Amino acid sequence: MKLTWLGHSSFKLEESTGTVVVTDPYHSNVGFDMPAVKADIVTVSHTHADHNNIENVQSSPTVLNRVGAYEISGVHILAGHTFHDDKKGALRGDNIVFKYRMDGVDLCHMGDIGEECNAFLVETLMPVNVLMIPVGGNYTIDAKQAKEYVDRLMPDIVIPMHYKTKDCEFDIDKVGEFLDLFDDENVIYAESATVEFDRADFDGEATKVLVLDKFNL
């Protein structure tokens, strides 16, 4: 399967069958425009403007923005309830974590999760091959909290998201604070925003941190 980072918390996930999922499409309030994209399915973790620009996704996709289990065009998707803050939603409301199975790869998109890691959530989500997790803090978990999720979920690959890039106008941290929590040999900087995964790529050893599109840092 192929994964492309579209910026902020938005990714394009493509299965070999041609089915396309787009996560958390954003409005320009982030500080830059989201590229035009087509998809069969759009998943929305919550209703804030930097995560719910459904209109920007072409081809009249199926929109998933509720908790549940789904199978669409051969893609299995599990949507689980979490909170956008550490006050049980009192500050910023609810958040949905999505888990996808595509081409035999288990991917998890944490949305704008704000609650601390807990055993119930970990047991619900495991196993995870590719984890997309916010690391910028302020509106979500911060770097240290994200590292705890990584340590307990033990993904093969973790892709940081929702952090300060060169054009982002949000008051959030840069990705460096998260990367500093890992050994240098386990951090990979990609030359582009796109990467391909195969089930056979995962050896179950050390988690690798994949920073997509290093030119945007």
Image (cartoon, grey):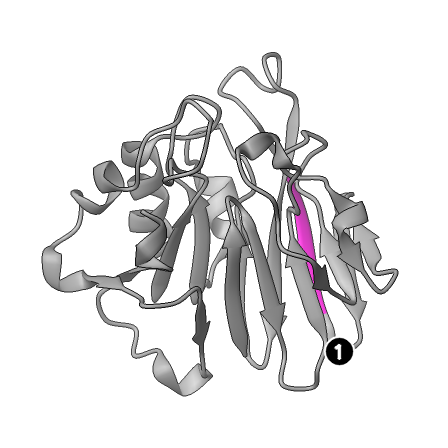
Q: Does residue 188 lie above or below 64 as drawn?
A: below
Q: Residue 52 at what x, y percent from top left? A: 71, 39
**Magenta region:** 76-81
Horizontal side, residue 23 vs residue 134: left or right: right
Helix, strand or loop: magenta stretch: strand
Q: Residue at the location (72% across, 76% down)?
A: 19
- Along the horizontal axis of the image, is 110 left or right of 51? left
**Quarter location, residue 144:** top left
Residue 187 horizontal/vertical position (percent): 21, 59
Q: Where is residue 196 in the image (x, y as percent from the top left)?
A: 45, 78
102 is within the stretch colored magenta: no
Write the residue at 35% across / 39% down.
Answer: 146
In reply to whether residue 77 is colored magenta, the answer given is yes
Location of residue 119 by image quarter: top left
From the viewer's side, name the closer residue of 155 and 212. 212
Q: Disc 1 marks which residue?
A: 74
Seen at 76% across and 62% down, the residue is 41
| Amino acid under disc 1 | Gly
- Viewer-nearest residue: 168 or 17: 168
Nearest the eye: 110 or 40: 40
In the rendered view, tell whether residue 54 sits above or below residue 82: below
Residue 61 versus residue 73 in the image, above or below: above
Q: Which of 43 and 163 is in front in this view?
A: 163
User: Badge 1: few (under 14), some or many (20 or more) residues near its Cα, within 10 Å?
Assistant: few
